[in-house]
Amino acid sequence: MASQAPPIGNGEDEIIWHSSTVEEALKLQSVTPDGLNESEVEKRLKQYGKNELTPPPKPGFLKKLWMQINNILIFILVCATIVSAILEEWPEVALILGVVIINVSIGLIQEGKAEKAAEAIKGMLSSKATVIRKGERTVVDASTVVPGDIVFIQSGDRVPADLRMIEVANLAILEAMLTGESNPINKHTDVVEGGAALGDRKNLAFSATMVMQGQGKGIVIGTGDLAEIGKISSMVGGVDGMKTNLMVQLEIFGRWISFFVLIVGSVTFIISFKDVGVGKDDLGDAFKSAVSVAVAIIPEGLPAVVTISLALAMQTLARRNAIIRQLPAVETLGSVTVICSDKTGTLTKNEMTVQAIQTAEAQLDLTGVGYAPEGELCEDGRPLPADRVARVLTMFEGSVLCNDSGLGKNDNGHWEPVGYPTEVSLLTMGMKLGAKDWKGLKASKPRVAAVPFASEHKFMCCVHAHGPAQDHATPLFLHVKGAPDRLIPRCKDQVVGEKFDTLAPIDERYWQDQAARLSAKGLRVLAVCRADFQREDITSDMDADLILKAPQPFLTMIGLVAILDPPRPEAIEGVKVATKAGIVVKMITGDHPATATAIAKMLAIVPSDANDKDVSTFTGPQLDAMDDDALDSIVLNCNVFARASPENKIRIVKSLQRMGQVSSMTGDGVNDAPALKAANIGVAMGITGTDVSKEAAKMVLADDNFATIVVAVKEGRRVWDNLVKVLMYNIPVNFAQGLSVFFSQALKLETVPLTAIQVLYVNMVTSVTMGMMLSMEPPEGDIMALPPRKTTKKLFGKKVMWNCVFVSSCMVIAVIGTFQWSLVNNPESPENLAALTAEDISNRRAGGGPRSERIDRARGEAFNMLVFAEMAYALNCRYLRAPAITIKIFTENHWCWVAMGIATTLQLLLTYAPGVNTFFYNGPIDGMAWLRILGFSTVIFFIVEAEKILGPKYLMPAVRPIFDAIYSLVPEPLKLKRTQTAMQSVRFIATSASTMGMPHPNQPGHGNPCAPGGGEAHGFDHPVNQEASMAAPHLHRERSEASMVAPHLHRE
């Protein structure tokens, strides 16, 4: 390393703040322990910017508009609009343009809702900060904190910026969001070795982490985007997303439709244009005919139906606590094959609960889950009598007294913890045993002295006066709780018979065996002890040596308390449902393997009766030692990953995707964000999740509950089935419309049976109405008893293609048949025939202009035939696999009959209302025509039902080879290849190890993705005092050097 530091703040070097002494840190930031003055604060705020994360750039309106228009179906509609305008067919222009505007508007509205949802989950950084300026504490807006500020933090605060601690008093900070470590980290002010991982930099406090206990002062060393959280957050923007299966399939489907439209439209033009030598129309009329066919085939209403269907499913899921941030993700849920879930807070309640109490005589079980004091004490499944419960409370009251946490109801009536989860669980235990007023218990036995818990000695002890503390005659007792291995050797006797006046010599072997037995079940075990204490032994510098260096053991063993964060009851049922549905649940946790295995057994993620040695469990360090091939070989067979880091998560996701799986990944921390974005469905926690994880995820769980994921998967399967139903309905209907016009031209009929306006009405009103009805269909049968859908499953598959051919043929015959019947049996009157001009004859062929009553009547019959055949076919489509001839067709989905009622009413209006029927080229029809329409519709319904029964066995085996042969000949752009689920590139892999060696957000060539236009980031992370910085080269490290420390954070 050169003796002179690189220019500060340019991102070419990294400052090793954790290796600086307190004095060096003060000097580097040009500040004293009394803090900065206001003028210096204003100067630094102007120079270094606000302490806030730069919001990601938002696309402008034109970009959003282009994102909605950039669709091949929309392009074709726009072209049809232009051609119609050139031909001065203004009604068609207005209708087609209206279709485009409606589709684009729906997309823009949904985009806006997604943006609002993203904005609603902002606010992760602390809004206020306590700083020391000119020697006085001042509360300021956290965004105005500047490098070099002295910040005071205490229990309950969110750290406002990255700090180098200069004073600490029993300070512990929860850093799980950054490091994945679930336990609070005890902080100190000593120098830390330069290569220490992020979680081991115990003299630093990181922005947005939570202070769990104690207090301290620190110098601000990193603000805004250049605080540790900002560096990670900005780089998450560099992780590429992926298209969902639905997006890819709809894109391919659009190409197919466009390809077919171009072929049929071109053929229509050729057979209509007289100069080609086949048709009789001039150039304008031939164009009109081709446009009318194109407009008829294009499913203009389909984009709207798909978008609205997904939006309705999104609202349904939101009511079930699953907030979908990207509409197409709703469908992807239905194909999930693996759910990778956090343990804490998702599969479990994240509410530590006392499960068992071990005395010298027996194990007593405590019922109830969570912090709510609801449960009872049992032995062998039988509740204990009240007098015995009271004795047990007296024995274990020390667990309430020797406790710095709190528990109470919030405004919503829910029990809300304050402090350490383990201590809160002891308060709940005390309340279940009868100490409902735990505050009163503490007040009646006031604390006189205490030694706080520390990881070095693993216990906490308090001296309490059992009576008035001022009365020197009041007896004092020392209450102790902590790790059994530390306290058992320091006990001289134990309580026998659950009475304090009956003691026996300590049986160390017994207590060690009981602690080991409970620990083997994945329970966290605490020993509860007490001893008489003399007032004269209380000193101002009393510490853990009181017990550790006592001349001989003097404690009395009360018993053991076994604690666990138990599975949610609904998660147990959720895993059961997921397993039945063929979905594998994998638990990924930072906990100990024994705890992870115990919870996995309770949830049936692994067999509950399996021997622990037979359960395949891999830890994070073991995964780190594997290459990708080795990980691929074990990832499908291992359902429990313990001591896993966020980096392990992303490797597991990518391995599952390489193995052909569709994975859902849960996470809540900043470091989880890349894995959430890489997964097919990233699921963030709504309660405990960070902003960054929520932004990266496609779904947010408002209740942090695993069972909600299973509900979402069920909804995803329903959505896919209903989308298939919508396609099964829409495509044959559109083909029938277009081919009716096409064959009328090919067969040289007198005129076309359907006009462009009629077709657009059917597409945008009837088809959308029926499509919306189908999208609201409930699940067909036990949808969660079926295996997950294969990712290669086509939305526009052979079944849909066959239906296009079969059903559209039936409808074309019905439409042209009724039209021609009406024309033949209702000849033009001599008066009308004489009044017709050459223009009228031309307009007959093109489908517009003045016309006779006879043709209007025939078109009215053909138009109604099409609509009522559609409605009959919509009933067929309500059931993909089962027959539609069932009583359920009347009892399920009442929207079906509402939609049909609306469609029928509108048809009567369009047929008989004067002026309206003229605009739509309709004429009133008689009763016989209605009989023919209803008769044909009924026949179509029963023919399709017969095909459902006979088709799979007799027709599809003959049809499939034909479709396979056609598919092999189509161009590559029309083929659906396997959906790419792996990431194309991952610019950043988050890890709990460190952010050393990452490209600096302000480094040339590495603009902050979150900054507008890749501009400069907010904040600063280098020394303010350049001279002091240059005088301390040992605190500088080139980022290229740093990358050698964590090479796994960089890609080739």
Image: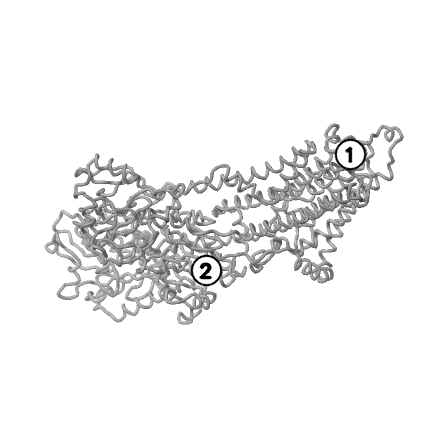
Query: What amino acid type is highlighted by mark number 2?
Result: Lys
Observer-nearest of 592 and 748: 748
For marks 1 and 2, give the one nearer the viewer.
1
Which labelled disc corresponds to residue 865? none
Q: Kindly identify which residue carries mark 1.
A: 843
As drawn, the residue found furthest toward the left would be 536
Q: Is residue 446 visible?
A: no
Residue 105 in view of the camera: yes
Q: Do labels 1 and 2 touch, CB within 8 Å?
A: no
Tally of marks: 2
Element at label 1:
helix
x and y, in percent, of residue 111 in the image: 50, 41
| Image coords of residue 287 (percent x, y) | 72, 39
Q: Which image quadrant: the N terminus?
A: bottom left
Task: Give left or right: position of 347 versus 742.
Answer: left
Residue 687: percent from the left, percent from the top?
Answer: 40, 47
Residue at the far right in the pictured view:
830
Q: Is residue 288 left or right of residue 125?
A: right
Tell which of 529 and 266 is nearer to you.
Answer: 266
Any mark on residue 654, and which? 2
- For disc 2, the neighbor class at 10 Å (few under 14, some 14 to 19, many from 20) is many
Q: Where does residue 569 sit, x and y in percent of width and height?
A: 45, 56
In this rendering, the answer to whether 382 lies above or below 857 is: below
First along the sequence among labels 1 and 2: 2
Q: Is residue 683 above or below residue 754?
A: below
Query: Which residue type does callout 1 highlight?
Result: Asn
- Foreground: 13 or 821? 13
Q: How is the image coloured?
A: one colour
- Residue ID at (42%, 56%): 347
Q: Quadrant of the C terminus?
A: bottom left
